[in-house]
Amino acid sequence: MRRVKIDWVDSTSLSGWGQIDDKAEMKVCSIGWLLLNRKDRVVISAHRGFGTKTGLESYHSQMTIPKRAILKMRDV
């Protein structure tokens, strides 16, 4: 499983970034486990866990980022 760092532009401040103009763009840096890499979007997860009894992987706090918003993506 790849862990990636993504620099991207958020198109709105409605999500609660605070202290920015509501017309401004916000440059964001996100780091997470790459779950999906499609032509139009990527999905990352902030948390990766392993079941103590089953050994199965679990993911939490997934986020989808549109490819058109990504400035740079690299492995970390």
Image (tube, grey):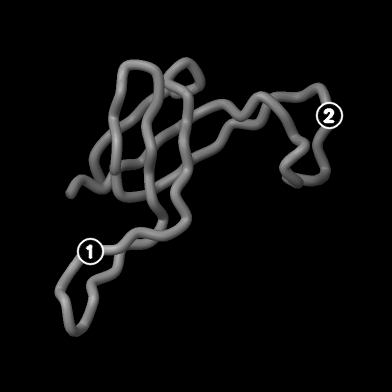
> Could you say which is closer to the camera, residue 59 or residue 54?
54
> Could you say which is closer to the camera, residue 17 or residue 58?
58
24 vs 45: above or below: above
Mark 2 and mark 1: span between their CA atoms? 39 Å
Q: How many marks?
A: 2
Left or right, 41 with reference to 53: right
Q: Residue furthest front?
A: 54
Residue occupied by mark 1: 57
Q: Amino acid at mark 1?
A: Glu
Report the residue at 38% width, 44% height from top. 44
Give how far across and how far down residue 5 sits, in percent. 36, 41
Left or right, 51 with reference to 21: left
Of label 2 and label 1, which has the lower sequence position?
2
Q: Residues within 10 Å of mark 1 (few under 14, many from 20)?
A: few
Report the residue at 35% width, 59% height from top. 59
Could you say whether the residue bearing mark 1 is in a helix, strand or loop?
strand
* Disc 2 versus disc 1: nearer the observer: 1
Give how far across and how far down residue 70 sits, in percent. 45, 23
Q: Residue 34, located in which quarter of the rendered image?
A: top left
Give how far across and how far down residue 22 sits, in percent. 84, 29
Report the residue at 28% width, 34% height from top. 74
68 vs 30: above or below: above
The disc placed on residue 13 is none
Q: Residue 40, located in which quarter of the rendered image?
A: top left
Could you say whether the residue bearing mark 2 is in a helix, strand or loop?
loop
32 vs 20: above or below: below
Q: Residues within 10 Å of mark 2 (few under 14, many from 20)?
A: few
Residue occupied by mark 2: 22
Report the residue at 33% width, 30% height from top. 73
